[in-house]
Image (spheres, grey):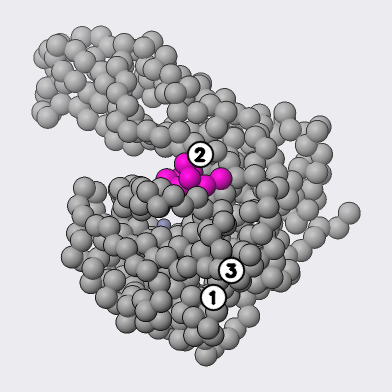
Amino acid sequence: MKAKTSQWTPKPDPKRELEYAEKLAKMIRYETVSYKGQIQREKFLGFHKLLEELFPLVHQHLEKTEIDGSLLFYWKGKRSDKPLVLMGHQDVVPAEGKWEHEPFSGDIENGRVWGRGSADTKCSVMAFFQAIEELLAQGVTPEQDVYLASANTEEVAGDGCPKLVEELTRRGVKPYIVNDEGGSIVTEPMAGVKGNYAMVGVLEKGQGNLKIIARSNGGHSSYPPKNSPIVRLSKFVVALDKHNPMRSKMNRQAKEMFQNMAPYGPSWMRLLFGNLWLFKPLLVKLMPSISPQAAALLRTTVAPTMQTGSDGLNVLPQEATLNLNLRYIPHQNMEESNEAIRKLAAKFDLEVEVLDAYPSCAPVDAHSDAFQLVESVIQEAFPGLPVIPYVMTGGTDARHFQKICDACIRFSPVVYGPAQMKGMHGLNEYLDTVSLPGAVDYYKLLIQRNA
Ligand SMILES: [Zn+2]
């Protein structure tokens, strides 16, 4: 059997591209870096003023609520039984290093908008505001209630979004669909799978930070004792690397993702993933050693991130520490993964402190009406673009909505090629302007088709 091919590529529309790129550029020029533990309300109020200038009709017709710099807008529909929440965060990560275009320049050049936030994720915020601006100009009243939720602490895992969820809970709102960032239109999502694909996030892993502590009563570095703190930590981290205590398994979401993608891949991929009944055990065993990305889809990952020892060149530490960042998978969730770490740590006489942790989210059912609505809107907005439900290894604010919504769908309707994947949180972030009209159309359709 021949491989299927993905047909869709974004269509140039210079006039709309420029109009949207200019709005996005202004949003980029207003620096909205968030820092852990800081509210910075004034800075974000300034950004809201800019939004008001860019999207006047939204501000005239929707009810706006501001909570410590995070935003919630309410657009009353004809009915309220299937509320839609469109999400995207206002804040960005800091921009260090030397950039081709200054990180807050918002330069528009050769079909690109440059700057921090262009891809993550002022593009989607611009696009859903613009979508509503245009629908209002046409005199549209949505069939269902629409909410816009934009937190200002996503990048620092702050409490901006939880406060918005609290407010919606207080109002008794149970969203039918929450559409946040996460997935996107990805070019070559797996090596050998050519073309563009709508990768729609249906499962978000949990996350935890663990501190591993080794203690001793010090001693002199001129006659070091056996198994001093750093030695024990080192043995532990080597053991962790050699005999990973996390179980690999291909859950339903990963399986559906591979099955949906395989027909577009090279022949070996079509053979293996087209016959999972036969090859699944082999794949689960082999994939983690071939690719770290694949491993992350199949098991809880453990990444050593920070270390401390003593303060002196010739001082043995009384306490040495090692930090681990974990991403939990549902089949070995927070408690169980942390326990596996504790068990291993105990062998080396180490203590484990959980600094912060939350479990993986309940997956979105890719066969549910809500998901299928999103799928049909993607097909209408981007004809020929294959839709692939996918397992996300990163975190989003959407997880806070899990308690009031069963369909927290993670999808930004813009094209992320390799440059965007590298640029987000890195150097030289930019977005191709050709992505923008489709993104606006996607949100317009989603609002109108949610009847
Ligand atoms: Zn983001």
Q: Classify mark 3: helix, strand or loop.
A: loop
Q: In which quarter of the image is ligand 1?
A: bottom left
Q: Give the range drawn in magenta.
A: 399-406
> Of helix, strand and loop, which one carries label 2?
loop
Residue receiving disc 1: 141
Residue carrying label 3? 143
Identify the amino acid type marked 1: Thr
Q: Can residue 278 be seen in this view?
A: yes
Q: Quadrant of the C terminus?
A: bottom right
Q: What residue type is labelled 2?
A: Cys
**Residue at image point 79% right, 48% down:** 270
Who comes first in sequence, dot 3 or dot 2? 3
**Percent position of residue 107, x then y:** 36, 80
Question: Residue 222 magenta-drawn?
Answer: no
Q: Residues within 10 Å of mark 1 (few under 14, many from 20)?
A: some
Q: Which mark is residue 79?
A: none
Which residue is located at x 48 percent, y 75 percent? Answer: 132
Q: Does the magenta stretch include residue 404?
A: yes
Could you classify mark 2 by the number of other residues whose Cα lies within 10 Å: few (under 14), some (14-19), or many (20 or more)?
many
The residue singled out by tag 2 in the image is 361
CA gap, disc 2 to disc 1? 33 Å
Question: What type of secondary structure mainly makes up the magenta span?
Answer: helix
| 277, 137: nearer the viewer | 137
Q: Is residue 9 left or right of residue 228?
A: right
Q: Quick one: 406 or 377, which is closer to the camera?
A: 406
Mark 3, ligand 1, within 8 Å: the answer is no
The spot of residue 148 in percent (x, y) is: 43, 64
Disc 3 and disc 2: Cα gap in Å? 29 Å
Residue 417 seen from this side: no
